[in-house]
Image: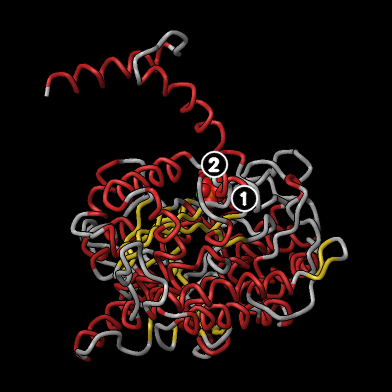
Amino acid sequence: MPTFPTSAAWQALVAHRDALAGTRLSQMWGADAARGAALTFSCAGIAVDFSKQRIDAQAIALLAALARERGLAAAIEKLFTGERVNATENRPALHTALRGDEHVAVDGVDLRPEIQRNRERMRVFAEAVRAGQWKGATAERFTHVLALGIGGSSLGPRLAIEALHAEADGPEVRFVNNIDAAEFDDAVAGLDPASTLVVVASKTFTTQETRQNAAAAKEWIVAALGPEALARHFVASTANNEAAIAWGLPECNVFPFADWVGGRYSLWSSVGLPVAIAVGMARFEQLLAGAHNADLQFRSDPFERNVPVLLGLVGVSNRNFLGAASHAVLSYASRLESLPAYLQQLEMESNGKRVGLDGEPVGLETCPVVWGGTETPGQHAFHQWLHQGTGIASCDFIVVARAMGKALAHHEILLANACAQSEALMNGVETADAHRACPGDRVSTTFVLPRLDAFNLGALLAIHEHKVYVQATIWGINPFDQFGVELGKTIAAQILPAVRGDDASLHPATRHLLDVIRKLGASQ
Ligand code: F6P
């Protein structure tokens, strides 16, 4: 049982949790048929149904009081107005500025001209590629884009392109993010270098995987078309122009973004270039518009009906009061297959932290494990665990109201399954046969998108970005750094010479493991 802070807001929530303890979700619904309407809120046109969460009107009031006690209103203003909310790296986190038109300045410099200039360059280039005006070295039109990048430099564009597949009328985009050569080989299989454009996305332009894949792509292009072809076939999206130029790109092939855009918040910047090429700049701007709409509501809605705020608070409640150590994202849309992976990075890299801004232990559990899948296939795989396992997960159901394919019957079945799963998780089933009994009382939120389009996708992602910020504010952590990923990178750099043959200064555990790998490699 965690020790909660002694503040009035936390203690009132503890008391309310205890008061509700004997009441099942199904009883809450039974006692109040208006619960659905009272606990469903809207943000940028997306309806979010919290009625299967362990909350009531009083819980919302108490959670909102906690948000006030933690200074959330001021924190939101700091985010939007360019204060250095990323305190450990001493910079703002202004991804919202990329999709809005409100005045925002950093150190007295208005950011809008630079943002508009970068967006304009992206537009001109993306449209030129789509129209066949920007051609390859042999004057061929680009039919394919090889998009290189990892983490935030890949997950967002991949998700957006998959989600907007029905509207993709530009060159086909293939992604390479892993440092497994098979991924590169598979991606270029069947491609003609003469009609392939390579887009390298890397905020730092130092990421090992991306640089290695860029080197492989360079070799692939140069072998077929010669070194002069690079200027026609390679472009980069980065916040480190110098490194991209030093790598060999002409400055006009570099699409910049500012260092106040975090990697996992960078879809809205020039990192979105493959999206603009695949579906057109107008649709990319719809994505920005949906996100901006969500931003406006996040900034102005009262906490008690503010979707990102409630999502954050309910998530805190599930993590800290119910002990839900895992959070499942269940996409009832095949084209949202990459959503769980995107949200996994967004939430876990942002809030997977154990110390607060003051460097002291947070004292409460922070970000749960975020995972999930595409439904209904997940129902035939891991839902068993959700219904009868010993762990507790909170679930987010992502449902699209309008059919995404041609066959209406499919969509009806899809919807029936989405509704059935959240009902089953809530109600469970009692039976004398212990093997068949499902305990129920398992919490979920359901998002309903009117349709799967760029606007709604943008809104959905921005809502989640803000959820993360709300939780970080409650827990008192910085969601915008990721120092935890550095240690493994440093050790990998030290081990690489040993993998290549020189294992002088290895840790004995690593030397042992390398021996096992070498033996097996040699025996094949
Ligand atoms: O290793 C973590 C990380 O820094 C992520 O935050 C980021 O999205 C990814 O690597 C890629 O970084 P870059 O865009 O600098 O190549």
Image quarter where the N terminus lies is: top right
Q: In front here: 268 or 2? A: 268
How far is mark 1 from mark 2, CA to CA? Answer: 9 Å
Residue with the mark numbered 1: 240
Which numbered tag is attached to residue 518? none
Q: In front here: 369 or 143? A: 143
Residue farthest to the left, as pictured: 524
Image quarter where the C terminus lies is: top left
Q: Is mark 1 within 8 Å of ligand 1?
A: yes
Observer able to see residue 1: no
Q: Is residue 471 left or right of residue 40?
A: right
- Labels in figure, total: 2
Q: Check disc 2 and report its element: helix, strand or loop.
A: loop
User: Which quadrant of the view contains residue 467?
Assistant: bottom right
Residue with the mark numbered 2: 206
Q: In front here: 51 or 131? A: 131
Q: Residue at 69% across / 51% down in the picture? A: 478
Q: What percent of the width, then of the height, locates residue 174?
A: 32, 61
* Circle nearer the N terminus (1, 2): 2
Q: What percent of the width, then of the height, locates residue 448?
A: 44, 83
Observer able to see residue 23: yes
Q: Check disc 1 and report its element: helix, strand or loop.
A: loop
Tag 2: amino acid: Thr
How many other residues sit within 10 Å of disc 2, few (<14), some (14-19) or many (≥20)?
Answer: few
Q: Is residue 436 left or right of residue 54?
A: left
User: Which quadrant of the view contains residue 7?
Assistant: bottom right
* CB within 8 Å, label 1 to label 2: yes
Q: Residue at 80% across / 69% down in the picture? A: 81
Q: Is mark 2 within 8 Å of ligand 1?
A: yes
Tag 1: amino acid: Asn
How many other residues sit within 10 Å of disc 1, few (<14), some (14-19) or many (≥20)?
Answer: many
Q: What percent of the width, then of the height, locates residue 164?
A: 37, 78
